[in-house]
Image (cartoon, rainbow, N blue to C red):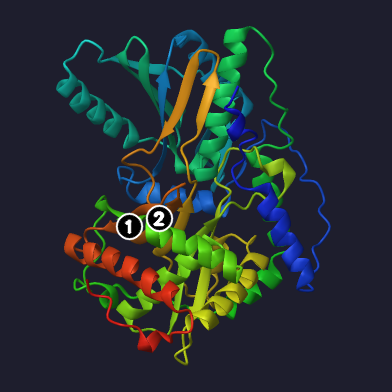
Amino acid sequence: MKDSSKSKIQPFSVEKQRLFEQLLRDSGIALPPRLPIPNRSAAEPCRLTPAQERLWKAWHADPRRIGQNEVVRLRLSGSLNVTALDEALNSLVRRHELLRTRFVESDGLLVQQAAASVNLEVSLADLSRLPASAQVTNCERLCGEQADMVFALERLPLFSSRLIALSSHEQLLMLTLHQIICDDWSKKILVDELSRSYESITAGVPCSLNELEVGYGDFAMWQRSRFEAGDFDLDLEYWRQQPAGGLPHGRLSARGGREAVSGSVKRHKVNLGEAASRHVRRTGRREGLTPYMILLTGWQVLLSRYSGQEEVAVGTMVANRNRTELRSLVGPLSNLLLIKLDLSGNPSFRVIFRRLKESLIEAFEHQEIPREWVVADPAVDCPLDVTFAMEDAEALTYQAGDLKILEEEPETGACHGHLALVLRETERVIEGRIEYDSGLFDQEEITQMAAGYQKLIEVMLADLDCRIMNMPPLAV
C-alpha cells in the first residue's frame, strides 16, 4: 500500500525508544515491570486527562482562539473513489473512540463520553473549472477556513473533513481535529490508517489493521489511578527540585512588558544551508551527538545571549507512547518536558554538550508525569512558552491502488508556544521555522534571531573548544 521505503510508519521511532531504554540501563536506572492497561466499559464516561483538561479550559476561555486545531493536508493524485474515501474516514471514527467523543459536565465533573456511532460527512468543493489564479486564491481561502474552524466541545463531531477538487485527477483533502482529541503523533496514525482502509475498500478485501488493545478512555483512567497510587511521586519530586528556568519576554524582545495577543501566531522560515547542515551531521557522528542535541543546544545558547541568563530551559514535546498498546492510539498523549541547560562558568561547547546529554537523560527518565500535574504543584514554577521541536524529515507518501497520497504541511493549525524553533532534517538541508506571537515580537526581531541562530551554529561547530563568552558577535 505504501512506498516500500516508508514501511511501518509509526508516530515515533521504536528503535530510538529501545536505545533510550538501554541507555537508562547502562546508567544504572532500573525500568519497572509493565502491567497491562485495564479495559473499561466502552459506554462508561470517564474523567479527562490533564492535557485534555488544559485544552478544555483554553477552549472555554476563548472558543474562537486560533491554534487549537490539529490539521492534516493531503494531496490526492489519481482516480479518486469518493464513496470509498467517505467509508474509509468513517472506519477511523468507528475504530478510535476519541473521534466520536464529546465533553460535558456530569454531577459537577467534566467527563468525556464516547457515542456508539457518529457519521462523518465529507464537505465537497469543486474548483476544477476556475482559472488557475482564482483556483489558488479560493483553495487557500477554503483551506484556511477549514484549518481555523471552531468546534463546540460538547457537540459531535470534533473531526471535520473537506475535499477540494482541483481537476479530475487532483484533489486536496483537509482533515481538522480539535487538539482535545488529537496530537501531532496521532495525525500520522490517521493518515496511515486512512490510506490502508481506502486501499482495502477499493480492492474489496478486509483491512489488515490490528484491533486496538485499549481506548483513550482506558488510558485516561489508568493514568489517573497511577497518580492516586503514588506512581508519579518520584517524578514530581524531581521536577520540584528543578529551577524554573523561565525566559522573561522582556529580556527576549524590545516589547518586554506587553501581553500576548491571541490569534497572532506568525511563522518565519529558517534554513541552515547545505554547508552548515553537513557540518551538523559530521560533528554529530564524530562526537556521538544527534542533530537534535546540536540544534537544541544552539537554540538554548542563543536564548541565553538574548536573555542574559546562565541557565536556560525550553519545552520540548515527547510522544509518551513507549508502551506497545499506545503506539496506534489516537489522542493527546504527548507530554511537554522542560530541558534545562547550565551555561555557568563560561564553559566550552564540548562541555555544554555533555551537560545537555545529562539533562536529557534526567528529563526523559521522568517524562511520564503529565506537565499539567507538575505545574499545578505549588512548589513548581516553570513557564514553558518557549519551545523547541524537530519534525519528521520528509512528507509521507502513500500509494493506495491508483491513488497517490502526499502529506503536505498546512499553513495554519496548532502552534508550539509564544516563541518556538521548529526544524526538520531533510536529505539536503536542515530547515524549518520560528513560530512567534506577533503581539510580543516584531518581524524584524525574529528575522535577526533567525540569522543569529544560523551564525551561532556555524561558530559553535567551527570550534567545540571555544568558550561561549569568547564567541564572536552574532550580528550579521
Counting residues from the N terminus, which is met first, the one under dot 1 or under dot 2? 2
Q: Which mark is residue 434?
A: 1
- Tell me the quarter of the image containing the C terminus: bottom left
In the visual, does 364 lie left or right of 72?
right
Determine the residue positioned at 24% across, 57% down: 261
Q: For residue 41, what is the image quadrant?
A: top right
Q: Secondary structure at mark 1?
A: strand
The type of residue carrying mark 1 is: Ile
Image coordinates for residue 73, horizontal then vertical, percent: 40, 31
Q: In this rendering, does residue 257 appear at all?
A: yes
* Residue sitting nearer the eye, 255 or 432: 432
Q: In this rendering, does residue 118 appear at all?
A: no
Q: Which mark is residue 422?
A: 2
Neighbor class of circle 2 (other Cα within 10 Å; few <14, some 14-19, many 20+) is some
* Residue sitting nearer the eye, 139 or 217: 139
Image coordinates for residue 295, horizontal then vertical, percent: 45, 65
Neighbor class of circle 1 (other Cα within 10 Å; few <14, some 14-19, many 20+) is many
- Mark 1 and mark 2 in contact? Answer it, CB < 8 Å: yes
